[in-house]
Image (cartoon, helix red, strand yellow):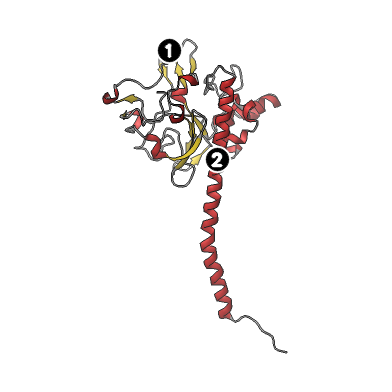
Amino acid sequence: MTRKAFTLIELLVVIAIIAILAAILFPVFAQAKAAAKKTADLSNTKQYLLAEKMYEGDADDYNCPVQYNNSYSVNPPSDANPGVLLKPYMKNFDILKCPTDPADNTARMLDLPDPNAQPTAARKQAQFELNLGFKANYGQNTEYFSAMGNQCPEAFKTFTISSTSVGKPAETIYDVNSIWDRTSGGGPRGGGNWGLDMPCRLYAASQGGGDSLPPVPGCSYRWWWGGWNPANPLAWNVFGGVWPWHFGDIANVGWEDGHAKSMKVSALTAGCDVQNGWGGYIFDKEKYLWDLQ
């Protein structure tokens, strides 16, 4: 009885064909997976904005404060942040996480009060949620929407604004994908950041000069994270806390009117000469995307 089998050459040819197909298809699968994550993240950005808009509807059109005080704790005086304040409108804390950020819940507890150190189950859960709020991957445009003052009569105070005071809501950034910290090699660490700095502060003389930021009445200092720092490429705030979690240096951006879209980080500096620590000027008010005009 004659038995037929593959020859060694035929087997090698089949293996080679499979290897070639794998080399072609695996990058396609990876790109499809990355695109799906970007889409899911864009949906989260939109849901976060919708929660903010519902909050404003219950708060006389004032936006959500970035922080109550500087304690980062549920211990009296207990702190808060948008993640916590928007919880009734979001229902799901996973909205606060970018799918591309590798940080899990354990990583998002880093550098903040340990929930397990709280005395009751309710307080443990409250601290856990507070920490997730601080580590949200959607950082608020803090300096314009919720300026923080230091050495105020209240020691620390936030100044929110009415949405009706924003001149061009569809052209004003409300939040952007963010990063908490980076390793010495530049990799992401710890999740996201609940607040951001914008790339420029002062208007150029050609734009009339002056400060673009709203005042912090009665406070000696304004809290900031050091601005954008393009000369320090491994710094966590090289982009003021903004982070391109998606392929092609893309970040998802939420706008004050409630829409969301994906943009290159370089496009977020339109109208602005970015220098370390707000050293540059806004040279085109019409193109600048961060102020309230």
Image quadrant where one finds the C terminus: top left
Residue marked by disc 1: 217
**On the image, numbered disc 2 is attached to which residue?**
41
Asked whether the viewer can see residue 278, the reply is: yes
**Which residue is depicted at the point 47% across and 43% down?**
187
Q: Quadrant of residue 267?
A: top left
Provide residue 205's location: percent of width, then percent of height: 26, 24
Residues 228 and 115: in front is 228
Q: Secondary structure at mark 1?
A: loop
Outermost residue to the bottom? 1
Position of residue 190 relative to residue 56, above or below, is below
Label 2: which secondary element: helix
The front one of 14 and 189 is: 14
For residue 238, say whether it is visible: no
Q: Residue furthest left?
A: 206
Q: x and y percent of residue 156 in the render? A: 49, 16
Q: Amino acid at mark 1?
A: Pro
Q: Is residue 289 left or right of residue 136?
A: left
Q: Residue at x 36, y 37 (%)?
A: 230
Q: Residues within 10 Å of mark 1 (few under 14, many from 20)?
A: few
Residue 19 quadrant: bottom right
Three-letter residue code for mark 2: Asp
Eye-nearest disc, 1 or 2:
2
- Alpha carbon separation for disc pair 1 and 2: 36 Å
Please tell me which residue is depicted at 53% across the width and 19% down the height of the picture: 62
Q: Quadrant of residue 239?
A: top left
Please tell me which residue lies in front, 118 or 263: 263
Number of numbered markers? 2
Label whose residue precedes the other's in the sequence (1 or 2): 2
Q: Position of residue 225 (x, y in %)?
A: 43, 28
Taking 224 as reference, is 2 left or right?
right
